[in-house]
Image (tube, rainbow, N blue to C red):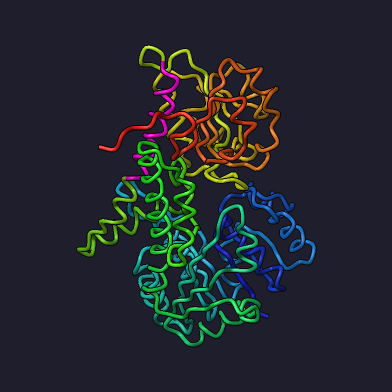
């Protein structure tokens, strides 16, 4: 049986390690955070992801999953090592690979035999080749040998476990037949499931991840710009998206208008691929436009709120209830969430802000230190709405559908509802109780304008 090591216990590493352990592999996950590792060994997940804690408990009970802070232990006990550490964006948009190189240096230091080193983190084109060259040089003069592979993840947060158990595809970039065969063993379950596999070179594999996320970001920015136009010409963006999605060449996926994309992937990956293009003399105009459109979308959402609620040109004295902080439902991830910038702008324009999110508040309290003292955290959506002039729905958590609308509106000071996810466009009860403003439709709160 192949022994697997995972360096990094974030969303990618933890889910990947837990799933592989459920297939019977002996998996050791490593992280430098002692408190996190202590809790993981108790079966307590540091992140909210449906189905993850069940896998953790299963792996710990069966003895197929363990956690350590020792890089030496995980390197020397593993045949295949997955690098799954963060690659955050630098201020200039380029990917910060400092965590990656710390791991690579530890591998070179503690290696004790043949290993396959697999890049699971999203890394700029050329990184796998650089890792291979570094390890080849550091092991020269020894009998040890390594092969390097790129194996990008395609997980959707909130569905990461199910996506790992039944992936849409598996992409592996390697120049070694031995590494290819070993990874076929690791992914034997997916081969049996007839999951599509693509074997390619390092650079193509790395590019596929960036290209996929950038294309989806472009699609979101495109529909968001059409939503802004729809509000001015009298069209309904949901009908437009439905009509477009009927075309098999387009598909309905990622055609939902909203406040802009966020999360741990799209913002940093679009910036990173633009940086790679710039460094190689190719400006990526389409991706750059998607980034600019996303920034515009968030600003437009704030302007919409201000237009409806402002008094004497300011939001001073207005109380706004924000429902949802996570960038999408079924996750606690608040990285690059549109809610952050929208809350920041509302505060700067004089509004008081109350917030509620089923899963995102714990991390918001920890990470949004510059905002936390200026916003009020609430224990429910109903409490959040009390004495508010307006509700701004930022994340489409399913529990919001069963809210007691009459009770909620009677505790509010106003009755304005900004539905940034178009969650209630077909709900007549919500429209009965609220002055309702969705994204991309003029029929609820926006006067029609004659086409010029």
State the predominant SS element of the stretch in magenta.
helix
Which residue ends up furthest to the front in the rendered image? 450
Residue at horizontal 66%, vertical 23%? 408
Number of marks present in the image shown: 0
Q: Is residue 16 left or right of residue 327?
A: right
Seen from the viewer's position, the closer of residues 77 and 221 is 221
100 or 168: nearer the eye?
168
Horizontal and vertical percent position of residue 425: 56, 39
Nearest the eye: 228 or 66: 228
| Residue at 57% from the left image edge and 36% from the top image edge | 324
Q: Is residue 184 above or below residue 360?
A: below
Percent of width and height locating residue 31: 57, 56
Magenta stretch holds residue 300: yes
* Quadrant that contains the C terminus: top left
Q: Is residue 415 above or below residue 40?
A: above
Q: Looking at the rendering, which quadrant does residue 150 occupy?
A: bottom left
Left or right, 301 with reference to 430: left
Q: Position of residue 105 (x, y in %)?
A: 44, 65
Would residue 58 be counted in the magenta stretch? Answer: no
Range covered by the magenta-colored residues? 293-310
The residue depicted at 38 percent of the width and 28 percent of the height is: 303
Image coordinates of residue 26 in percent, x first then y, are 69, 71
Residue at image coords 50%, 37%: 420
Among all residues in the image, which is located at the extreme right?
61
Q: Quadrant of the N terminus?
A: bottom right
Q: Quadrant of residue 341?
A: top left
């Amino acid at each position: 049986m192949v022994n697997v090591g995972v360096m990094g216990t974030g969303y990618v590493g933890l889910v990947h390690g837990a799933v592989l352990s459920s297939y019977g592999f002996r998996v050791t996950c490593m992280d430098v955070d002692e408190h996190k590792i202590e809790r993981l060994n108790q079966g307590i997940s540091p992140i909210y992801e449906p189905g993850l804690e069940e896998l953790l408990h299963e792996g710990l009970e069966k003895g197929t999953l363990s956690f350590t802070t020792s890089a030496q232990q995980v390197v020397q006990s593993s045949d295949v090592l997955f690098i799954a550490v963060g690659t955050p964006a630098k201020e200039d948009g380029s990917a910060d690979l400092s965590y990656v190189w710390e791991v690579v240096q530890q591998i070179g230091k503690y290696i004790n035999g043949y290993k396959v080193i697999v890049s699971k983190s999203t890394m700029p084109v050329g990184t796998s080749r650089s890792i291979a060259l570094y390890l080849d040089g550091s092991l020269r003069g020894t009998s040890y040998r390594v092969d390097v592979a790129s194996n990008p993840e395609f997980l959707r947060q909130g569905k990461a476990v199910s996506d790992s158990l039944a992936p849409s595809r598996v992409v592996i970039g390697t120049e070694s037949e031995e590494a290819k065969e070993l990874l076929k063993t690791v992914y034997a379950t997916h081969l049996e499931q007839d999951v599509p596999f693509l074997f390619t070179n390092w650079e193509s594999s790395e590019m596929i991840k960036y290209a996929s996320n950038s294309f989806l970001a472009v699609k979101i920015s495109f529909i968001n710009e059409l939503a802004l136009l729809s509000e001015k010409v009298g069209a309904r963006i949901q009908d437009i998206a439905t009509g477009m999605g009927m075309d098999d060449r387009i598909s309905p996926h990622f055609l939902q208008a909203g406040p802009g994309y966020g999360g741990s992937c799209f913002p940093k990956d679009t910036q990173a691929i633009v940086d790679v293009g710039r460094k190689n003399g190719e400006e990526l105009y389409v991706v750059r436009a998607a980034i600019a459109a996303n920034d515009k979308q968030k600003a437009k959402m704030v302007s919409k709120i201000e237009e409806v609620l402002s008094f004497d040109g300011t939001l001073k004295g207005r109380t706004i209830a924000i429902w949802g902080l996570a960038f999408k439902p079924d996750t606690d991830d608040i990285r690059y969430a549109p809610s952050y910038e929208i809350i920041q702008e509302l505060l700067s324009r004089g509004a008081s802000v109350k917030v509620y999110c089923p899963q995102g508040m714990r991390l918001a309290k920890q990470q949004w230190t510059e905002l936390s003292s200026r916003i009020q955290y609430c224990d429910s959506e109903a409490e959040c709405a009390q004495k508010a002039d307006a509700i701004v729905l930022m994340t489409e958590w399913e529990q919001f559908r069963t809210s007691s609308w009459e009770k909620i509106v009677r505790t509010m000071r106003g009755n304005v509802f900004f539905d940034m996810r178009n969650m209630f466009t077909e709900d007549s009860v919500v429209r009965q109780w609220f002055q309702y403003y969705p994204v991309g439709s003029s029929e609820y709160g926006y006067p029609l304008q004659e086409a010029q």
